[in-house]
Amino acid sequence: MRIIRAAAWLGRTLLIVVPVFVLATLVTFLLGAASGLSPAGLMLGDAATTEDVARVNAQFGLDQPVVVQYLDWFAGLLRGDLGTSWFNGLPVAELIAQRLGISLSVAGLALILGVTGGVALGVLAAANRGGWIDRGVTALASVLSTIPAFVVGVGLILVFCVLLRWFPSSGYVDPTVDVGRWLSLITLPAIALSLDTAADLARQLRTGLVGAYEENYVTGAVVRGLSPRRILFVHVLRNGAGPAVAVLGMHVPRLIGGAVITESIFAMPGFGRFTAESALRGDVPVVQGTLVVAVVLVLACSLLVNGLLVRLRPGAEREA
Amino acid sequence: MTARTSRLLPIAALAASAALLLAGCSGAAQGGESDETPTTLRWAFSLPTSWDPVTSSTGNDINTLSLVYASLTQLDEEGNAGPGLAESWEYNDDGTAVTFHLRPDLTFTDDTPLNAEAVKASLERGQQQENSLLKDQLSTIESITTSGELDVTLNLAAVDYQVPNLLAGKTGAIVSPTAAEDDPEALPTAPVGAGPFEFESFVPESNAVLVKNDGYWDAEDIHIDRFELSVAPDAATVVAAIQSGSIDVAGLGATQIPEAEAAGLVVQQLDTLGVSQVDVHNGLPPFDNPKVTEALKYAIDRQEIVDVLTAGTGTVTYQPFPPGYIAYDPELDDRYAYDPDKAEKLLAQAGYDASNPLTFDITAAAYNEAQAQLVQAQLAKIGVNATIALVPAGSSTWQQTVYLGRTAGFALDGTVGRESPVQNLGVVYGLTGLMNTSRTASDEFLAALDEVRATPLDDPEYATVLQEAVRIGVEQSSSFSTYTSKRIIVHSAAVSDLPQFLSQVRWEGVTVGD
């Protein structure tokens, strides 16, 4: 019975995910084709001639009809081949993989910090709902959400790198090369990125928990003599965390792929900055590749969140 | 109680790891290591478009390529050719062949001998490889012969005494023939040369790590053991990055000099061959009227641009070379000195006035927006109605619009310079020069260029002949130069000053203290 339910869920999911993916790749590809950009500018720089331009265009198959180009590209996608960068001729998949690793390090730490901080603040606010702690947390969360990323980044550098000299202010090193330096380099960007997540999470969790507190079963639990701590952590948290989990699900892709400003300020060769720089350079295959990866990330996160929500509140599935 | 303890444990663990993290971080930030540490220098500049000089697409790459490759000759502080991999050379009697004598016992970092055959193979690859971007520059060489281990003779297509200059930079960077034969496709990301440093690792558009090459012919002047090259950080964080020790040397915007000096850092202003100019296409109206193009040369207040955009670090110039360089003609010092009245009179003669104002687009790259606005305002003072057309940063549109498509009539541009002044004149004023959007050149100019090529570099008349060609180019072209730029470098006090070389950044003699 459970297997059938799982299979049905998988089938329903695929029915949505696959068309979304195909449509997204089509739009991505058409954007590149419609841009009118060509690899000649990037590869030839200030040494170009008209013959060189024609040679380079033919080399990249740009003299083919658009439909053929799309099918070739899509077939490559399915094999994991995201094409070749117009800027340095390297495989896009390899370039993205290098940078994704960096962004995942920073995003991972940011997620840990953001979740820890957000949950702590949200629970604190909900446990003291209506009091001055609750109002203080809400105010703090609002402030944290509105500070722009570059202000936070530059502020952190000024305090921790220049004044206190506790951390280096730029660059990245692989953890396999030097774990200590790796940690020291990802800490500040992770803090900068985590603030928005913590703030959002705190607010959503607080609202969800407060709502859950008003449910009947909570009154019943109080009457049965359960301790406030048990009520909060065993019952209310599980039922009130839904909106917070959903919000977190939306933050994850943003942390991995959207940290352009933070990555620029800390001179980290991350995924977001790479996408932005490639777009400015007109390196179409890279931008197409990063968009596809972003689509996959968002879809994966959505699926994960949906799965989590179902586990948290099995009743919700029945209600839906 | 038990439940409480089990809740406290994860918190305690988190606190402990945080403390460890901080301890590890301070250690890492201070770089606490034992004695006998190799000297490391971290330069935030840019990564080359390709580590293979044959497919590098911009002249600016010489700054990074010269870290791993040595060239046949090398330009000295004034930009004149001196010994490099070749310790001497001489021409035949009619200037149609030049023989270079290599230093003995040199090898590439992969232990391939750096002999005459290797040089021949390297130069021929630049001429013959299908995607080579050096074909044009190397076309002056018709064939290459070798004699013994150390003598390479270049047989030229015509008289050309510029060859020692030409082979001083990217064009003459010698690549290991073993690496080129084994896997030429790998060279753009894994170079093998005989330069000051050996390539160790590279993350595209991020950073490269190089280590000292003890086999470099001038290794005794290199005092850096480990060289880390990375991409320039955001302008707002350059000073902080050097203060925090993440990088040691970086480029600096002119307006940030006071901030850097206030922070106790050292700022150097190095002269370069870089000259900004305006590419004017005299085949497109309204620039097909010589009075209009003449007027525009007087209409730009170059000193104002220098003051505002370069914080006074640049200098006004009316020719594509900086003052003091051998090609610089002092007689052109005030050639097109700012004269708005004269400009207005010339425009009136061309039929433009308040009732019929001259109108056109100023094409500029996005990073040049400030200059475009200044020029627009200056043109407005003489009644010209100019609109700014911005080209997005880094895209191929500039090439399509200005260089190849040639649809831009008035474009803000600039040259980073070339090792050979004749090459630079060719790019700026020559018949097929990329920056000469008009694609026209008088016979008089082309003859003058030929005469420079036919004059030996050590001839007492060389400077005169060269400057004459410059004068003709400046006066006859519709394009015009505006100002020179300095290379502004900021470094921590621990790093010694960089030597002053016109054509590129070099590291000979640079030391890193504590």
Image (tube, rainbow, N blue to C red):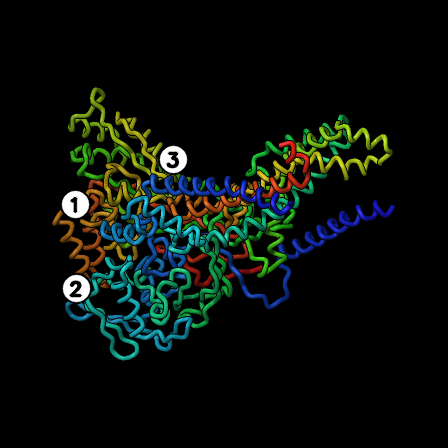
**Is there CB contact under 8 Å for labels 1 and 3?**
no
Q: Quadrant of residue A310?
A: top right
Q: Which mark is residue B145?
A: none
Q: Which residue is disc 3 drawn over?
A: B370
* B43 left or right, relative to A132: left
Residue drawn at (27%, 42%), measured in percent from left and top?
B402
For the residue carrying disc 3, how many other residues have a C-alpha within 10 Å: few (<14), some (14-19), or many (20+)?
some
Residue found at the very far front of the displayed protein: A1
Q: Secondary structure at mark 3?
A: helix
Q: Which residue is disc 2 drawn over?
A: B157
Residue drawn at (42%, 45%), measured in percent from left and top?
A287
Residue at mark 1 shares a chain with residue at mark 2 = yes
Badge 2 amino acid:
Ala
Pinpoint the chain carrying mark 2.
B
Cα–Cα span, label 1 and label 2: 23 Å
Q: How many marks?
A: 3
Which circle's residue, 3 or 2, is located before the other in the chain? 2
Cα–Cα span, label 3 and label 2: 45 Å
Residue B204: percent from the left, percent from the top? 45, 55
**Is there CB contact under 8 Å for labels 1 and 2?**
no
For the residue carrying disc 2, how many other residues have a C-alpha within 10 Å: few (<14), some (14-19), or many (20+)?
few
Residue A173: percent from the left, percent from the top? 56, 56
Please identify the quadrant where the C terminus of chain A is shown. top right
Q: Secondary structure at mark 1?
A: loop
Residue A44 shows in the view: yes
Q: Which residue is disc 1 drawn over?
A: B440
Q: Secondary structure at mark 2?
A: loop
* A18 left or right, relative to A119: left
Badge 3 amino acid:
Ala
For the residue carrying disc 1, how many other residues have a C-alpha within 10 Å: few (<14), some (14-19), or many (20+)?
some
User: Who is closer to the viewer here, A102 or A229?
Assistant: A229
Q: Is residue B18 above or below residue B120?
A: above
